[in-house]
């Protein structure tokens, strides 16, 4: 454990003063730069946590090595402005609990002296972890938590790269409007189904908001217990409400159970717009063809490779390393290390203030990200990436195909979705 | 409106019998040994995994792996009794309550270590799909589970009442000291009961695996509901567990449909509490 | 002996500066306190509650809600939370007063789950999103500290000592005597005329009050709470384990139990958890089984037999 010199100073904030322990200033360029990675590596969401970790591991491998890829710092070994210093991940298991998020964030900062923190997938855990880093004055770059509230706190050290649920919810309704205008398919009623967790209920709120704004009638608003033993009551209600479109926000377990129950009870909306669980690799592995025609919000899809060869190149490396295709979660977590490393490199220092200043100046161009974004640039107030957008993918033949925005679609949208009985 | 209600009633019966099947093993153990097996949910999980591996590696459909699940879990249950639970039988109640908690944590995480936290599903079991009877959709695997539940309950009742071993178990359940006096080897009966109880939930696991997703933590909620069912039905009472299981199925499904799905388990627990206040020994307990 | 331990605990933060070691001690104190509170109803009065998380959560939510909505001082919120938790305990305690052993345990679980599900859907307190406490300037008055955990450490140590004093008072008072009588035999106690409903209720309410205090502390420490962080079954179970491991029915038992169990829990997560293999929890589960099976009187029982102290 290093000696910690104490310097206290006030960082302006709207309502609070934050004191910070400072890591010792870097006199000579370090050989390794430690980054903390917080994920649920055990517990209910372990399979997701491990998936996210794969994305981060690949990113670190690319940064530390020499690859002919259009990604920040790929072509050099390590960070050139710091004498080729390489990144070293310090992994921390949050077990999916907010209190561990705080404890682990503090631990990796104060004991392992990490220069920045990534993670933690679950928004509730990211909340407390980033509260800790804010108090300690260490940068936190998040690219896998989607609660809008994370960038509404006025934090100075927290940056989010990926889109949040407000953006995703807005996308869903933009899509419906497009459907009407471009494809002449009219939708009038929607049903909202979401698990009653921080994630689900936030999505529910956002969807209600945009439903009003866009002028759609919400015929059912169902909040259900996650990891339920049985969902026939919920599906019964949906069938009764008879919506044109169902919007479902859940993690993987309920996605599986609901899909089976929809089939069992014959629930046939014109289409389904979903979030999170449906895009995890475990979902299709479990439900196979029953998952067809489901539309999921996404940041990433393998078919982007058609317009952006970088995606195929990165996926190839991912396959080599892990024996499977890159998933949405791995792809989202993949980006944060690049943003952080790029900032440290530009700052030419691991000193938190310098890194944060560099983060604020981040301007990664469109051709260096594996998504259809215009790039990465943070809003000066909220520190949310202003170019983070989502797409919609539809499961066709048990593969995820980008179907919206229509201009960047790789495959044609299937709408309305065939009823269960008429499917093979 | 009528056909809605009918569908929900059918759903209630289906999920209720599944619950009953899961709970029967627990009530036997509880009745005989006065021990709440908090690892019951984890036994269920292991049963489900066994069915899964039989399907994936040996291509045995879950309906045929029932005896395998029952056998493996029987051995596991008896072993757990012999090496772990028997040590606390003479100890303080608290130790008895806690030791199976430890077992549940151990088993759930052993599953993580052995099989990873990923979710598995048996995609094409023989008993698959839905029957449409008029306006009602009947899930075939759940229906099979319900039939299984009835058969298993009847079977275990026959075993307990008509066979020598079964009667010995009943004797121990009713009065341990007298059973000892009559020469019944209560230790052996304990191990046997634990084994049988575990085997029963193994069967439940095989049925459940036909339609539910499988992963190390799957036992949690099922286990919790089982405790309520067993206490509701009366410890040791097989018939009680069956009836209580169906009752809970109704409360959960109708409560979720007509009241609020987010509260459906709260309603189950509330009904449990109220029943136990009015009649502490449960519906059919002594 | 106690004096020595107390002095060591008081001096600990002066020698150990790291944030994580302090966090571990704070977790130890937190669960020790709740273990002591549990003991009052469980170890002493024989009511094995597996639902203490309900009171922990009520305490945390009460003070946090009052703070975020009405800007009420957390110290007042602390008392309010304690009172509400006691009332809730009384409400559940009366109907449950006839239940014993396993039945009581399961009823307590059912109760705690109802509370959790309700809070998870209650928009007033943020439902599933929980409550985020405002980051105010650090001061004793605000019950928030940012640059160091040391004040948190001492405050909680104070709470713990308070709980121990309460427990000690309970056990040596007439109430404590009656508790032991009730625990030994319900029926005999009834015959002798002890109004055991009243005493059981008192035990439950005191226990709930202290547990709620711990809840408020937690809220002020983490500055964020949601139903999954404060109202879940694993917290209730950990409280029971701490008391049992250390020695239920002894005053210092839960403190020892917490001192052993919490570092193991945190330590296995840190050193083994990150691999994602679940080994940390396997170790934890095994330990629990070993202790229950071979040393159910807990460490305190073991120490007493060696003659090191008085239970």
Image (cartoon, coloured by chain):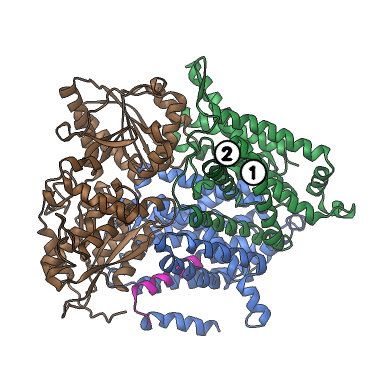
Chain colours: A brown, B green, C blue
Query: Where is C308 relative to B271, above or below?
Result: below
Identify the chain of the residue marked 2, using the numbered disc in the image: B
How many labels sit on residues? 2
Can residue C198 be seen here? The reply is: yes
Q: Which residues are magenta?
A: C16-33
Tell me whether the residue at label 1 lies in contact with that at label 2, contact meaning CB atoms closer than 8 angstroms.
yes
Q: Is residue C69 left or right of residue B86?
A: left
Give the CA separation, mark 1 to mark 2. Answer: 10 Å
Residue closest to the eye, C182 or B119 = B119
Looking at marks 1 and 2 on the same chain, the residue that comes earlier in the sequence is marked by 2
The residue at 48%/20% (across/down) is: B4
Q: Main secondary structure of the magenta part?
A: helix
The answer to if A107 sits in the magenta stretch is no
Neighbour tally class for label 1: few under 14, some 14-19, many 20 plus, Cα within 10 Å: some
In the image as oriented, which residue stretches furthest toward the top? B134
In the image as oriented, which residue stretches furthest toward the right? B182
Identify the chain of the residue marked 1, using the numbered disc in the image: B
Q: Which residue is mark 2?
A: B60
Residue A389: x, y in percent?
18, 43
The answer to if C25 sits in the magenta stretch is yes
Neighbour tally class for label 2: few under 14, some 14-19, many 20 plus, Cα within 10 Å: some
Residue C295: x, y in percent?
65, 69
Label 1 and label 2 in one chain: yes
Q: Which residue is mark 1?
A: B68
Q: Is residue C87 left or right of residue A18?
A: right
The residue at 22%/54% (across/down) is: A335
């Amino acid at each position: 454990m290093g000696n910690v010199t104490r310097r206290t100073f006030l960082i302006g904030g709207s309502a609070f003063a934050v004191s910070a322990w400072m890591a010792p200033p870097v006199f000579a360029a370090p050989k390794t730069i430690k980054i903390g990675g917080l994920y649920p590596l055990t517990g209910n969401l372990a399979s997701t946590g491990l998936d996210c970790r794969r994305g981060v591991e690949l990113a670190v491998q690319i940064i530390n090595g020499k690859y002919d890829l259009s990604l920040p710092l790929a072509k050099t070994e390590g960070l050139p402005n710091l004498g080729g210093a390489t990144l070293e991940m310090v992994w921390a298991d949050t077990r999916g609990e907010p209190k561990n998020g705080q404890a682990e964030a503090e631990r990796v900062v104060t004991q392992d002296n990490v220069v920045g923190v990534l993670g933690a997938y679950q928004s509730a855990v990211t909340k407390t972890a980033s509260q800790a880093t804010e108090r300690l004055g260490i940068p936190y770059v998040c690219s896998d938590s989607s609660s809008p509230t994370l960038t509404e706190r006025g934090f100075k050290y927290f940056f989010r790269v990926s889109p949040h649920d407000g953006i995703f919810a807005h996308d869903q309704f933009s899509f419906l409007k497009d459907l009407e205008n471009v494809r002449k398919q009219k939708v009038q009623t929607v049903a909202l189904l979401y698990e009653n967790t921080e994630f689900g209920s936030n999505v529910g709120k956002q969807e209600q908001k945009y439903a009003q704004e866009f002028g759609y009638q919400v015929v059912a608003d169902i909040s259900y217990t996650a990891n339920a033993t049985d969902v026939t009551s919920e599906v019964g209600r949906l069938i009764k409400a008879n919506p044109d479109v169902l919007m479902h926000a859940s993690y993987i377990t309920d996605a599986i159970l609901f899909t089976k129950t929809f089939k069992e009870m014959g629930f046939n909306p014109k289409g389904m717009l979903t979030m999170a669980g449906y895009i995890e690799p475990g979902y299709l592995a479990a439900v196979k063809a029953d998952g067809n025609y489901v539309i999921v919000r996404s940041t990433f899809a393998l078919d982007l490779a058609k317009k952006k060869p970088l995606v195929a190149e990165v996926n190839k490396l991912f396959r080599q390393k892990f024996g499977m295709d890159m998933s949405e979660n791995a792809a989202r977590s993949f980006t944060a290390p690049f943003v952080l490393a790029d900032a440290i490199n530009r700052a030419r220092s691991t000193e938190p203030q310098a890194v944060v200043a560099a983060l604020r100046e981040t301007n990664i161009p469109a051709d260096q990200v594996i998504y259809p974004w215009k790039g990465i640039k943070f809003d000066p107030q909220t520190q949310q990436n202003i170019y983070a957008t989502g797409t919609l993918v539809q499961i066709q033949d048990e593969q995820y195909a980008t179907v919206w925005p229509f201009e960047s679609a790789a495959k044609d949208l299937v709408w309305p979705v065939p009823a269960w009985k008429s499917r093979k | 409106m009528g056909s809605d209600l009918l569908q929900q009633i059918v759903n209630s019966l289906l999920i209720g019998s599944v619950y009953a099947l899961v709970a029967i093993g627990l009530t036997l153990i509880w009745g005989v040994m006065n021990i709440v097996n908090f690892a019951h949910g984890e036994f269920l999980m292991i049963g489900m995994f066994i069915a899964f591996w039989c399907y994936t590696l040996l291509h045995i459909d879950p309906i045929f792996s029932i005896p395998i699940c029952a056998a493996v879990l029987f051995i596991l249950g008896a072993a757990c009794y012999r090496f772990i639970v028997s040590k606390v039988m003479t100890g303080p109640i608290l130790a008895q309550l806690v030791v199976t908690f430890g077992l549940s944590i151990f088993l759930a995480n052993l599953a993580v270590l052995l099989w990873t936290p990923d979710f598995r599903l048996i995609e094409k079991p023989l008993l698959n799909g839905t029957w449409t009877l008029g306006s009602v959709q009947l899930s075939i695997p759940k229906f099979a589970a319900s039939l299984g539940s009835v058969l298993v309950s009847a079977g275990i009742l026959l075993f307990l009442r008509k066979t020598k071993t079964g009667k010995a178990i009943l004797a121990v359940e009713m009065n341990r000291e007298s059973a000892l006096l009559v020469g019944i080897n209560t230790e052996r009966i304990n191990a046997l009961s634990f084994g049988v109880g575990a085997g029963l939930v193994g069967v439940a696991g095989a049925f459940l695996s036909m339609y539910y997703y499988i992963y190390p933590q799957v036992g949690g909620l099922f286990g919790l509901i089982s405790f309520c069912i067993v206490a509701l039905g009366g410890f040791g009472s097989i018939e009680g567990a069956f009836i209580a299981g169906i009752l809970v199925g109704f409360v959960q499904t109708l409560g979720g449909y007509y009241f609020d799905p987010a509260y459906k388990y709260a309603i189950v627990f509330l009904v449990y509490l109220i029943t136990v206040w009015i009649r502490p020994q449960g519906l059919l307990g002594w | 002996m106690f004096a020595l331990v107390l002095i060591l605990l008081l001096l600990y933060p002066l020698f150990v500066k790291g944030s994580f070691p302090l966090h571990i001690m704070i977790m130890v104190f937190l669960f020790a306190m709740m273990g002591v509170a549990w003991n009052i109803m469980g170890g002493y009065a024989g009511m094995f509650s597996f639902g203490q998380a309900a009171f922990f959560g009520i305490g945390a939510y009460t003070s946090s809600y009052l703070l975020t909505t009405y800007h009420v001082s957390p110290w007042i919120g602390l008392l309010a939370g304690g009172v509400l938790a006691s009332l809730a305990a009384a409400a559940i305690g009366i109907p449950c007063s006839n239940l014993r052993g396993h039945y009581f345990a399961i009823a307590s679980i059912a109760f705690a789950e109802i509370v959790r599900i309700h809070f998870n859907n209650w928009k007033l307190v943020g439902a599933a999103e929980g409550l985020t406490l405002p980051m105010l300037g650090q001061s004793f008055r605000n019950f928030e500290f940012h640059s160091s955990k040391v004040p948190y450490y001492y405050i909680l140590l104070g709470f713990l000592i308070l709980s121990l004093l309460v427990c000690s008072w309970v056990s040596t008072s007439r109430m404590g005597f009656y508790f032991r009588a009730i625990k030994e035999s319900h029926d005999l106690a009834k015959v002798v005329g002890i109004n055991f409903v009243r005493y059981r209720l008192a035990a439950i309410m005191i226990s709930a009050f202290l547990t709620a205090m711990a809840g408020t502390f937690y809220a002020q420490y983490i500055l964020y709470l949601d139903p999954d962080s404060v109202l879940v079954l694993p917290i209730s179970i950990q409280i029971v384990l701490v008391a049992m491991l250390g020695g239920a029915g002894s005053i210092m038992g839960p403190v020892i139990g917490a001192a052993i169990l919490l570092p193991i829990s945190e330590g296995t997560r840190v050193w083994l958890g990150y691999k994602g293999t679940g080994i940390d929890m396997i170790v934890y589960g095994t330990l629990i089984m070993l202790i229950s099976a071979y040393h159910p009187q807990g460490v305190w029982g073991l120490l007493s037999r060696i003659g090191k102290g008085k239970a």
